Amino acid sequence: MSAMVTQVRPPQPGEMAAYYRALPFANGLPSWEPADAAWHGGPEPWPAQRAPASAEQLEKWAEADLKDESFHPIATFVDGTCVGASATLSFEVTVPGGGVVRMAGVTATGVIVTHRRRGYLRQMMQAMFDAALERGEPLAMLSASEGSIYGRFGFSPATYRTRWELARHEAALLPAATIESESESEPGSEYEYASGAGSGSGSEAGSLELVVAAQAKQVWPMVHAVVRASRVGELSPLPGRWDGLSDDADGTNGPLRYLVHRDRRGDVDGIANFRLPWSSTAGNAGTLVVEALEATNPVSYRALWSVLIDFDLTKTVVAPGRPRDEPLRWMLTNPRAMRVTRQSDNLWARLLDVPRALTQRSYDTADELSFTIAGDRMCPANNGTWRLRADGGSVTCVPTGQVADLTLTVPALSSLYLGGLSAQDLAYAGHITPHSDGAVGRLARLFRADSEPHNSFGF
């Protein structure tokens, strides 16, 4: 019997249908581990699986993906048959200091069940890392469908998300005077809204309006651009990010509704997508699901929530995919009323080029630390001892022969990169080893960012 011929390479245009069929979602197979999903707003743990894609659907996917310059597919072929598939999407991600870093988003990964445990996923991951470095992307990120898979490739959680619920009868807000926006409010003015969702409701400081999907498609890119500029962990939108917004009903979920806030000049500064799904059970009836909400200032943020948490003929508001440090909690008269019902990691990060990535973010604390990385087999240029020096706007990370202050793993450094995880916790777990007094505390202060990183959508 002749030896099998294995190739790990991008699929050709004529191979795209076979490429998709190696991916779970294209076959109606599970694409998420069986746990309550914090990104899902329904009462069930996760949405129902899709039906297998038709030949026509596969053809449409191929046509769109082959035109997308940000899409970089990779596949494993054994004797000409596609048995594994993955891809990276080129993004920019906001990092501490407000700068952006080019990032390879790993997505849609699968190896067919008859060819698992043969190293094909590692080979595809290596090929994607190498290609990302050639494109000048020093960072890779992904949403881990199963928590035990991606750590062995150097990924580690960097952002988190929650799903919370709030009973309408507990949703009383504190007075608004303490959160006036300097840009929108004059001394002595308050920003208050009556309950309900009437189009055009508001005050001299701003207004709320229900709009249709066509208007929401125009508003979302503008609001997201402002939010992304200051939110660590937020991603650049891919082309067509909001094209799927519609006024049509989605089965028993009902149609999406779009609530827009404008400041007193008439400029849009906030938007929310919500729906009122039908339920066959009394326990889930009267639920309003906020699928997305973004605001560029506290006044707009409060105004949007003031309507959504006191909507007529509802009893519960559910908000999935939200940041762990949701400010709305501290606008409530009873902060305990907001109950986190699901929580999970969101994006996992992996530094591909340590010095380049570290010098493209900023640090609030001026310090100089040396650290050693060893054992990075997939990106061996990361191995060695590095001296990171942050002094105001100047950041350098260069090889050094001096004794390291600490040793840490690539996953630990990747989790620290956006500033949302505790260096003390990682050290306690054995991922960071200090070699000098106070080194872990200095590392924690150097990398910490406020507020916690968050990304509002996945890929």
Image (tube, rainbow, N blue to C red):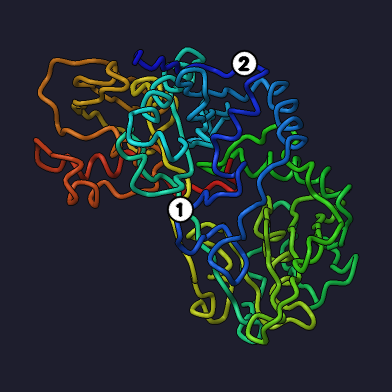
Picture coordinates of residue 128 (x, y %)?
46, 22
Q: Is residue 182 left or right of residue 400?
A: right
Element at label 1: strand
Q: Which of 362 and 212 is in front in this view?
A: 212
Residue topped by disc 2: 12
Residue 379's place in the image compared with 232, above or below, is above
Q: Residue at x 55, y 38 (%)?
A: 23
Residue 224's place in the image compared with 404, above or below, is below
Residue topped by disc 1: 160
Q: Residue at x 74, y 37 (%)?
A: 57
Displayed quadrant of residue 256: bottom right
Q: In this view, does 428 lie to the left or right of 417?
A: left
Q: Nearer the viewer, residue 204 or 8?
A: 8
How crowded pointer 1 is (Cα within 10 Å; few <14, some 14-19, many 20+) is rated as many
Q: The C terminus lies in which quarter of the figure?
A: top right
Work out whether residue 358 can be spotted: no
Q: Nearer the viewer, residue 80 or 248?
A: 80
